[in-house]
Amino acid sequence: MHDTTPSTSRLTVLTGDRPTGPLHLGHYVGSLKTRLKLQETHAQYILVADTQAMTDNAHDPDKVRRNVLEVALDYLAVGIDPHKSTIAVQSGLPALAELTLLYLNFVTVARLERNPTIKEEIQARGFGRDIPAGFLCYPVAQAADITGFKANVVPVGEDQAPLIEQTNEIVRRINRQAGVDVLPEAEALIPSMGRLPGVDGKAKMSKSQNNSIPLSAAPDAIREAVRSMYTDPYHLRASDPGTVEGNMVFTYLDVFDDDRAEVERLKASYRAGGLGDMMLKHRLEDKLQALIAPMRERRERFAQDPGYVFSMLRDGTDRAKAVTQHTLDEVRTALGTFSFASVRS
Ligand code: TRP
């Protein structure tokens, strides 16, 4: 099952998450849900991207280190099965760092600065000329992550799409320089619903914005998050007509309530007037409690045995190490860089 030579029949999937805090519903909707499906049909690798997390957390390595276990627990909690998916720790894969160094020569600073994802993140963090070089260049490292596994498919939220674009540009440059298609291009698999907004209605759910619902949230925290959810500020009485668009309770029901017909009926009745926010919030809370409860229980079980989780990570990292080293060797050979192995005495 855990063959390290790339399978010819199955496509390869690669994703990752920065271990900077607990994963939340936004991660679930944007990517984890897709990974649960893909692990049944694809050769799937998942990176705990601690090296990438350092690019904007160099002042807090403790946080990154502690969250490696937390993110691994979140994976196991949602149902990522280490017998089907390979979970690896990025810092344990030196070949990725070497590929990054190589790729940096195939990307211009101007191109890095034009990357929309990076632009947005630079703005959010208030970086100017003081931007850490590692942060500006992390898309190149991410290209190394993706190509190091020769991934064909990358399930990510839509905010990450420009990074896959940039990866494919690097792939084409390397292949052109090598004169052979040593690396495959990757396809971003983006969920059709777009990104899940925060409970406050802001465009993105994020721990730093304090508008997220962690996958490990306690029942009380889920209740509180739903209670505080942004609805229609002009919908004061249940009898008033209300607005559905931009109303987070409906946005979330659209994602988490499988009874589509009922949700449409509720929307119509909310628009007409006569439906209170509380009733809707109760309905949504029930859905979220039901989704998260089994995750929380699984998480608690695994959390009691960190030794198991770390040995799972170590196994996964060992397998990933072989795959990525193999790719690095192939890229070097294809480019014809120096190697002692090729020196004849
Ligand atoms: N940039 C991703 C995030 O912030 C994490 C990540 C690291 C990743 N390496 C990756 C995503 C490779 C997809 C593929 O969530």
Image (cartoon, rainbow, N blue to C red):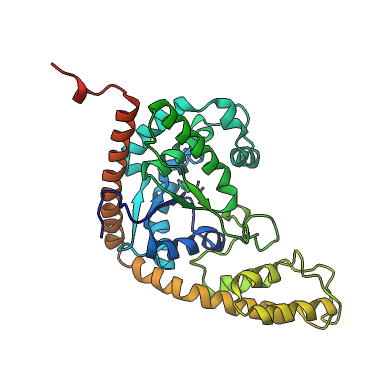
Q: Is residue 256 left or right of residue 243?
A: left
Q: Quadrant of the C terminus?
A: top left
Q: Quadrant of the N terminus?
A: bottom left
Q: Residue at x 39, y 54 (%)?
A: 11
Residue 323 against residue 32 in the figure, above or below: above
Residue 59 against residue 67 in the figure, above or below: above
* Residue closest to the far left: 345
Q: Position of residue 110 (x, y in %)?
A: 59, 26
Q: Is residue 278 visible?
A: no
Residue 116, image quadrant: top right
Instruction: Identify which residue, 330 or 319, lies in the foreground.
Output: 330
Instruction: Identify which residue, 187 or 23, lies in the foreground.
Output: 187
Instruction: Identify which residue, 337 or 23, lies in the foreground.
Output: 337
Q: Position of residue 314 (x, y in %)?
A: 27, 52
Instruction: Identify which residue, 4 or 314, lies in the foreground.
Output: 4
Q: Is residue 49 visible?
A: yes
Q: Is residue 219 left or right of residue 342?
A: right
Q: Residue at x 39, y 50 (%)?
A: 47
Residue 208 against residue 335 in the figure, above or below: below
Task: Please tell me how many numbered marks the rendered image carries.
Answer: 0
Q: Position of residue 21 (x, y in %)?
A: 49, 54
Q: Residue at x 41, y 33 (%)?
A: 100
